[in-house]
Amino acid sequence: MNGFNLDDSLGYIVAKTNFHMKSYFNKLIKKNNLDVTTEQWVILNAVRQNPGASQTDLARISFKDKTNVTRILDLLVKKGYVTRNIAGKDRRIYSITLTDSGEDVLEQLIRVAEQANKTFIRDLDHDNYLKFASTLKEILNSAEKLSSNLD
């Protein structure tokens, strides 16, 4: 046995943290009577930051596969939060935009997300938070480079 401890593994710590943060955020969403999941929240944000993006673009931006993005968009269209518009001459490609209702729910979600983020870091002083965020971004950059080099 090499003494590897899963509880001390960076990937496990990040995954476990993500799980609990997502769970807490979902509870806040429900508590605020918002008819959206965290998965839908991610797509709504991606649409706002990339108006007119295609479903393929949204999949890349949100780190989700195209099938899941299509399913999520179907639900968001049904809820009246986004619209699909034929993009140019290729009728197979749609550009996605937020509706006024989508903007409204996204504004509410942003307030809930800000509340959640403040709660998550409330025990850290500002300097420690900035150092932590900077270190995590460095690790992310390294991981992105390493994963793209394996393609």
Image (cartoon, grey):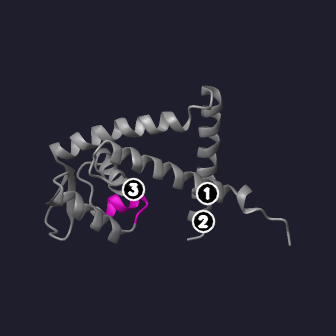
Distance between the alpha carbons at the discs numbered 3 and 2: 19 Å
Q: Earlier in the sequence, mark 1 or mark 3?
A: 3
Which quadrant of the view contains residue 135? Answer: top right
In the foreground, 148 or 31: 31
Which residue bears the numbered disc 2? 149
Residue placed furthest toward the top: 126
Residue visible at 16% across and 53% down in the picture = 80
Residue visible at 60% across and 26% down in the picture = 126
- For label 2, the SS is helix
For the magenta stretch, what is the residue range? 56-64
Q: Residues within 10 Å of mark 2 (few under 14, many from 20)?
A: few
Q: Earlier in the sequence, mark 3 or mark 2?
A: 3
In the rendered view, tell whether residue 12 sits above or below residue 104.
below
Give residue 54's position: percent from left, percent from top.
Answer: 26, 60
Rendered-image quadrant of the N terminus: bottom right
Residue type, label 2:
Asn
Residue type, label 1:
Ala
Residue type, label 3:
Ile
- The secondary structure that dominates the magenta segment is helix
Give residue 148's position: percent from left, percent from top.
Answer: 56, 64
Which residue bears the numbered disc 1? 143
Which residue bears the numbered disc 3? 61
* Mark 2 or 1, closer to the camera: 1
